[in-house]
Image (cartoon, coloured by chain):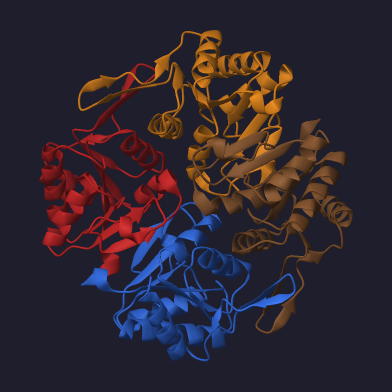
Chain colours: A red, B blue, C brown, D orange
């Protein structure tokens, strides 16, 4: 049943390198293979690549859009959520997930990482931000070496959410 | 394909009469039978009854929650969206739909009707609010006599969105 | 002291008739004379006229803007709050006030009236929306005949908030 | 005139060390002395200390609250903005400012830093987060050694916003 599935967010830049797109697509594929539902911000770049991967494996994709139009979703979003609240939608992306996989990304991605950690939602990182505060490293972002490891860690941690 | 489906919001009180619950359940059933995806605020009352009806017919149900926890969704919500933005989530409920069916309801429902009309999203009413401004009736809420008529009108109007 | 002052929202269309603008300006003037702080959506029409009136009497004006730029505020807004959350900012306008005065208005104004009533914040109406639900009149919007009566009622009701 | 003043946000933990509170109070004092308006999240810790400092020097303080009640503001907030949108209000705090001063802070503060940088709003840091992405340091947070330097930098940068 759909409501036993895990919801995993994939976050990253709306523009990204081809290497990041490849990683994101693999993450999306692996999430779908393992029966998880993909949550993302619904736009291009990492989000589109992840949705493309998940769709190719028959997975479900949710895109939580910042603007007022469902037309702004990438073509692989099956369930567009139209918020109209701009970047405040970043909060909704992470809160709607039980774990978050961050791939590269800019300040928008960093805000999503922050909101997730603030809410106690685990964050797995693939070549993304690293943090220190007051001069001390903060290791809350859990590193992964490749898409499969990222998905495995996300699903394991989501089980406790 | 899921992304060719119509998204229809069902709105109404989180507490409701048994008659309203019956109407909402029929609306949910009919939406699912006609292949539409149900969007709602994810809580009890009219929302729960509509989700129960849609689920019984194998339909997909989305609950856009005001709080911070997916646990607050009614048991028939398959896709909980956790916004954490309180009643401002009412905007997200209607913007995520191509047409809205209002059943009874209190001021929260009225705010959703208003946000829908503001955004040009059609609203079909089943024994709900009626409006006049500056002393003149405003007939923007399209009346329906029963669940089937409401669903038919919603799907027809959604086709143009 | 500023924090003993009453916060009163004035809501209405971003476009309005010259008569409505006159009423809004008088409401703004009277609020300032009585020492209240004016809260509004920060845009044109009724909002601008109310801010102009309040400013002319040395009052403080707060404009809670939907977009991303403080430049979008009308020239009489002294304190622009830049939300970036679109129409969801309507919730913030009314929640930041202890009473609301509605002048004419369209669906956006109706959404603000609804959110105020939902939150138990009194609404005083000057030739604005009227409501009925399930065929029964809902008299929650308190009518006023002129700007002075509206301001007096708003300040009296705000005292209990 | 009030609308020629600069709006500067002070962000940091709702709980903080006594040393951070001292720094925040000095920042608040200095902002008020230089005629700036203080924007913050309206709660305790760094926010309260900054508001106390600004109030002591006759400055204006704005508190943009996450919840539904103006009573939750710290006692030095003169202008409470009641958003009801939870942590999504962090976006509003930074967008309402022309520059941001971060003092220490946890993940909520990091989300505010991120949203500011995303929006092109300068961030000055006093013993706060530091960032690197994809293994490279990101020096977007402008360091300051003490409250006076932080305020000077913030006001200079705000002049260009």
Q: Quadrant of residue C136?
A: bottom right
Quick check: C56 above or below A91? above
The location of residue B49, given as percent across then percent down, is 46, 79
Q: Does B127 sit left or right of C27 as displayed?
A: left
Report how many numbered discs are placed on residues in the image.
0
Q: Say whether residue C136 is left or right of residue A111.
A: right
Can the viewer see residue B53? no
Residue found at the very far front of the displayed protein: C18
Q: Quadrant of the N terminus of chain A?
A: bottom left
Residue B6 location (% of width, % of height): 33, 74
Which of the pair A51/A115 is nearer the observer?
A: A51
Q: Residue at x 29, y 59 (%)?
A: A62
Residue A74 against residue B96 in the figure, above or below: above
Q: Residue at x 12, y 40 (%)?
A: A18
* Left or right: B44 as drawn, with respect to C12: left
Q: Where D37 falls versus A67 (above or below)? A: above
Residue at point 34%, 79% (across, down): B55
Q: Nearer the viewer, residue B31 or D52?
A: B31
**Image quadrant of residue D125?**
top left
Residue A137, horizontal then vertical, whole percent? 30, 22
Location of residue C4 (image quadrant): top right
The residue located at (11%, 38%) in the rendering is A19
In the rendered image, residue B51, in percent from the top left (x then y), is placed at 40, 76
Observer able to see residue A124: yes
């Amino acid at each position: 049943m759909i409501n036993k599935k895990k919801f995993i967010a994939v976050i990253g830049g709306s523009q990204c390198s081809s290497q990041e797109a490849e990683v994101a697509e693999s993450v999306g594929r692996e999430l779908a293979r393992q029966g998880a539902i993909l949550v993302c911000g619904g736009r291009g770049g990492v989000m589109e690549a992840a949705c493309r991967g998940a769709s190719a494996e028959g997975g479900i994709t949710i895109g939580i859009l910042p603007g007022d139009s469902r037309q702004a979703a990438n073509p692989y979003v099956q369930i567009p959520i139209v918020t109209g609240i701009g970047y405040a939608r970043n909060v909704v992306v992470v809160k709607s997930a039980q774990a978050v996989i961050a791939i590269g990304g800019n300040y928008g991605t960093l805000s999503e990482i922050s909101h997730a950690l603030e809410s106690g939602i685990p964050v797995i990182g693939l070549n993304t931000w690293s943090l220190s505060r007051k001069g001390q490293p903060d290791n809350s972002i859990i590193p992964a070496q490749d898409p499969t490891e990222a998905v495995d860690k996300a699903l394991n941690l989501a089980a406790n959410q």
